[in-house]
Image (cartoon, grey):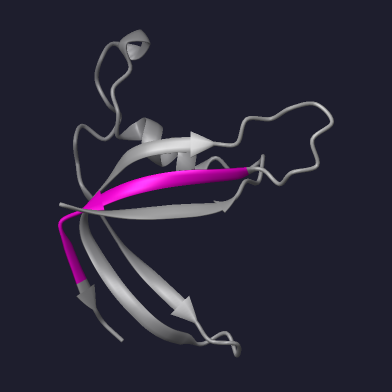
Amino acid sequence: MVRLLLSMFQLFEDRRLLDLYSDSHSEVIAGGGSVNKGKRLTGSLVFYNQGGEPAAQWDLTGIMAASYKSTKMEAGSTALATETLDFIYEHLHRMK
């Protein structure tokens, strides 16, 4: 297993990273099972050039969220909120 760390600015209406982590980890309060029942995901990491065209692409298989962290919000703070999701994956293939 290899790790990939993804950090991005947090959009309060967008719960995709938190939901991805929550769906793959059990919670005692929810009965101890996970939503995706241990199923590993597939995905792609794509970098785009300034013209908006894909410049490089890697396909990943066997992806699972390992940890999730978000910025601690404090009243009066002007800092941008970020969230970080740490992935593990089994295979990485360069496609472009």
Task: Pinpoint residue 28: horizontal percent, then vertical percent.
Answer: 31, 11
Task: Pinpoint residue 2: horizontal percent, then vertical percent.
Answer: 20, 55
52 horizontally vs 94: left or right:
right
Residue 48 in the image: above or below residue 6: below
Residue at 36%, 46% in the rendered image: 86
Q: Quadrant of residue 64?
A: top left
Task: Pinpoint residue 92: horizontal percent, then vertical percent.
Answer: 20, 68
48 horizontally vs 78: left or right:
left
Residue 34 in the image: above or below residue 8: above
Residue 7 in the image: above or below residue 35: below
Q: Quadrant of residue 20?
A: top left
Residue at 34%, 67% in the rendered image: 44
Q: Main secondary structure of the magenta part?
A: strand
Does the magenta portion include 85? yes
Residue at 38%, 83% in the rendered image: 56
Residue at 74%, 27% in the rendered image: 74
Which of the image's four quarters has the C terminus?
Answer: bottom left
Does the magenta portion include 46? no
Residue furthest bottom as drawn:
51
Task: Pinpoint residue 1: horizontal percent, then vertical percent.
Answer: 15, 52
Front one among 84 and 63? 84
Magenta-highlighted residues? 82-92
47 horizontally vs 12: left or right:
left
Front one among 40 and 9? 9
Count all numbered tags in the image, as a single digit: 0
